[in-house]
Amino acid sequence: MRLFGKFILNFSSLHCFTPCIAIIFIFFITNTAFSQSKNPRPGDAISAKDSANITPVVKLSDSTKKSNTNDSSTVSRLEQKLGIKISKDALPSVVKADAEDSAIMDMKTNVSRLYGKVQVNYEDMQVNHGQILFDQGKNKVVAAPSADPSKDTGTLKKGSFSQGKEKFTYDSMQYNFKSKRAIVRNVQTQYGEGFVHSEQIKRSPDQVIYGAHSVYTTCALDTPHFGIVAYRIKVVPDKLIVSGPANINIMGVPTPLFLPFALFPISAKQKSGFVIPTYSVEQARGLGLLNGGYYFYLNDHIDLLAQTNIYTKGSYALSAVSNYANIYRYRGGFNLSYAFNKTGESFEPGASTQKDFMINWRHATDGKARPGETFNASVQVGTSSFYSNNSYDPNQILQNQYQSNISWSKTWQNRPFGLTISALHNQNTATKQIDVTLPALNFHVTQFNPFASKKRVGTHWFDKITASYTVDMLNKGTFYDSTFNLNNLSLNNFQTGIRHTIPVSASYTILRYINMSFSANYNEYWFGEKQTKQYSYSDAKVNVEKDYGFYTARDYNAGVNFTTRVYGMKMFKHGSLKGIRHVITPSVGLSYHPDFSAAPYTYYYQTKLDTTANYYLQSYYANSPIGQPVAGKAGLVNLGVGNNLQIKVRSAKDTTGTGTKNITLIDGLSANTSYNMAVDSFRWSNIALGFRTNVLDKVNISSSAAYDPYALDYNTGRRRQQTMQELGYGIARFTQASLSLGANFHSKPTGGKGGPTNAEEYARVMRNAGYNEYVDFNIPWSLNVNYTLNAAKNFSYYSHADTLVLSHNLTFQGEFQLTPRWKVSMNSGYNFTYKQLALTSIDVFRDLHCWAMHLQTFPFGPRKSYNFTLNVKAQILQDLKLMRRRDYRDTPL
């Protein structure tokens, strides 16, 4: 039975009759009051069978808001409409209340009681709870808990309170609408990454909160794993939380760790502040304070983190990390590090000092900021020993290349050309060689059809001819980081070159099935120096003479290539194999370029480089950074063939018989060689073979091999002019080969394909890349394996025979979960040539919900060490951590 607007009122005397009739009239006019009840109580004054909303409080119109500035005429009209007098003490805004179960209205005391998922709204405030009492005379709301039907008997359901950005859950609460003061018990409030649990709080009108018996934690559980317990706290909204003496509590057990006071920033904006250091004890460097410093919040676009490591035995490190961003324009970061490592005293044997630095800079512009113009930078410059002396990351320790690229690019709208200016840097940490290119300039005109006409009807053969133009300028210098000195740097340390390139090409289809492509290239070189080498008998060395000036050279080549495809197919009507397809791609080409070492070009010269009577052909521009014309005449016939093999299988899961799947057995199997008609000897080039495939989308296999068609003179170790076939030794002899295997295996994610298990933690770690690495416990196990094999036949002057030289190396990286919260990962490898293990690291991770544990070990080798960290995940308590370390410089474990 559905009852609408049915009221059962409890009159204490007849003088209540008139106000009661007025209240009923108001409710019917405004159409805001009706009640239903699934479980009516005997004492309820208003009840109904069905569930609905209840609004037992008079709803005042907007004209009564802001009582001191009300329009009196509007209030009068409202009084005439309602038929009652509006009190001057009425609330300035509307109070709305909804209840799912039932409500009691006592007209004598002006008190309303609401039951069952009650919600009270007043201005920007909202109160939710199981039972709420509203005293209209005192403008007070009292919220009490009710039983939670979704949990065990006796469990009380918590209420919620929200006003503006402030939100919290609670057991019971008293709130005054006029004074906006509240007293709340058993409160749980979230401020950013932190939570505050209080037995009782007092809330003032300015939303400042005073809490008693409170716990601050970053654990999201109702019973947190840890917390900072304080007898009194004060919360200033959007600023900070401050407490008196506090004690760190873990799993409900007090610890001996006490704080005289505590400050927790809760501002939505970043703030400057100190970074508390951790400590480390090492035998070689002594007691150290690590990663202490100061964070500077400069403005909304840039910040700065300055940190230092200090050791009692003289070692120290400094770093400055800055991130900057201007939304929709650019973003980037800068990292400068300097380290001074001192081992032992100067009078001790084996004592050493090492100075290292590292500069990292990244910058990227938004493509929409300035269309057609970009500026990007990726810089990594430092001493070759920086990571080996200061890092515990195996990937950084094994890194043998530093590369940098700073580039500015410009393209013009509706114009066919573009410009790029770059600064390049390449550093080999093994050889300590540094190559710097400053600047590198590229100007290009995009491909166009010089003979095409928009007015011409039809297509002619010359319409398909395309051309383009490119000019490259490089200014390159080579140094060694141990001898590099800015004071001794000059322009003579750099080699400058400019190359102009004009390629012309065209493609045609002839005889329906043959593709013919033609190409011709012209290159012109501009050099800034010219050098000659000559052996000096008096000095017993090769003297190099350099002439600086403006020199030019040029070369050109032309070629034509023919390709087609031959298909072989076989279909099967029965069985799981439906068909086989074999594609053969043969190619034949002709190419030509003259001998640029001979007249009239003479870009090369004959000279003696040793005490023998031999003369060697050398180029005047051997050190050119942009290349040079090649020596030797070439009239090549290029021969090649490629193969691709696929099968089509029927799907066993498809009951209709139409479902199929293509599987590639051989991605590519190729053979290439060439025949030079322009020379009188050694006309055949080496035969190059290549193979690649993928097995089950898990294992990538690629290999290559080279065979020499000419025989070898085992007395001198030189190639003979006779081919292997002419001497009856077969077609060609093996010279070298390589094989590469790469496999990636991993289990299915336990949480589906929705991304990382903890998205918030993943985002936090990605924002702070470089300090921590995200560990995805959603992947139970994974394994990456890479194997390389290189084989070569080298002539031995000792045995006058070929010697097969093998070098093969295996590297692997794997991780697996012992339990849903424990994970172990390992990086290692094995060099079969030297029969030794590569740098090996074993990491153990433990997810402790709100804490994280990481044990990194290098169990053996020259870097034998370990690093243990136990820390809180939340960034707000990043200084609450425990670290233990044994450095590889210390006495072996």
Image (cartoon, rainbow, N blue to C red):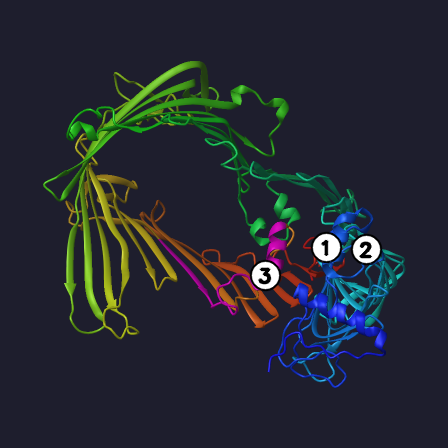
Give how far across and how far down residue 746 sits, in percent: 47, 65
Q: Amino acid at mark 2?
A: Gln
Residue that mark 3 sits on? 775
Residue 843 lies in what quarter of the image? bottom right
Amino acid type, label 3: Val
Nearer the observer, 294 or 327: 327
Query: Mark 3 or 1, which is nearer the eye?
Result: 1
Task: Tell me the crowding category of disc 3: few under 14, some 14 to 19, or many 20 or more residues within 10 angstroms, Cα based.
Answer: some
Residue topped by disc 1: 164
Q: Nearer the viewer, residue 144 or 79?
A: 79
Secondary structure, mark 2, is: loop
Is residue 180 left or right of 854 when viewed as pictured?
Answer: right
Please tell me how crowded label 1 is: few (under 14), some (14-19), or many (20+) other residues with Cα within 10 Å.
Answer: few
Query: What residue is pinned by disc 2?
Result: 207
- Quote the CA–CA distance across marks 3 and 2: 39 Å
Mark 1–mark 2 CB contact (< 8 Å): yes
For this rendering, which residue is in front, 627 or 799? Answer: 627
Q: Amino acid at mark 1?
A: Gly
Report the quarter where the N terminus lies.
Answer: bottom right
Q: Choose the circle earlier in sequence order: 3 or 1.
A: 1
Q: Is residue 720 left or right of residue 49?
A: left
Q: Is residue 596 left or right of residue 340?
A: left
Q: Residue furthest left?
A: 511
Which region of the structure is painted magenta?
Answer: 739-767
